[in-house]
Amino acid sequence: MDYITVGEIIKAQGIGGEVKVRPLTADIERFRKLRVLYAEEKPYRIMGLRLDRDYAYIKLQGVDTRNAAEELRGKFLQIDRINAVDLEEDEYFISDLIGCGIFTEENILLGKITDVSQSSGSVDVISARSPQGKEFRFPFLKRIVVGVDVAQKRFAVMRKLLEEVCVYDD
């Protein structure tokens, strides 16, 4: 089955098996439409859900104790692709972007996408690693990104503009 990652379990919440989830979706309200989530391909029916600002608190069927919830800490929650929302033009699932090669207009590989951070601001931030292992980040701006082909795992950027805004980790 083809899955899309929608959240990461941060910790157990309370003693009844509820988990605190960091959403990996642009709209946290999408969790209200879900009935089943997968963790490591194991299905869990959603028995309860509450949303609080930037987090979802979810009660999963069969996860009835704090210890059972703690065993899920750090696991990613997914949905099957057939239940995914339709995307607008120039919208992408984060899970589809992770692993894409970042190429310049001269077809030079700069690195691979390792993460996409969504903040309360208006611009997502791409995290990547160069072939030499150096970590870097840059904003996902239309003026920098000239093309995305998730089927080919290619993310094309304008090198000169990227260099103006890119931040490298030491």
Image (cartoon, rainbow, N blue to C red):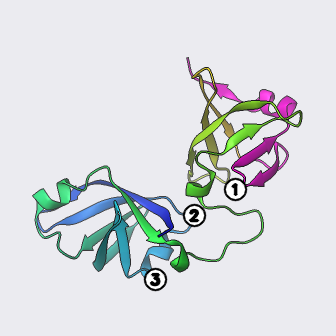
Comparing 70 with 78, the one in front is 78
Residue 92 sits above or below residue 142 on the image: below
**Label 2's element?**
loop
Amino acid marked by disc 2: Ala
Comparing 12 with 3, the one in front is 3
The CA distance from mark 3 to mark 1 is: 25 Å
Q: Which residues are magenta?
A: 141-170
Residue 91 sits above or below residue 60 on the image: above
Residue 54 visible, this angle: no
Q: Position of residue 92 (x, y in %)?
A: 66, 61
Q: Position of residue 113 (x, y in %)?
A: 62, 41
Residue 31 visible, this angle: yes
Reply yes or no: does residue 158 show up in magenta.
Answer: yes
Q: On the image, numbered disc 3 is attached to which residue?
A: 33
Disc on the earlier residue, 3 or 2: 2
The CA distance from mark 3 to mark 2 is: 14 Å
Residue 165 sits above or below residue 148 on the image: above
Amino acid marked by disc 3: Lys
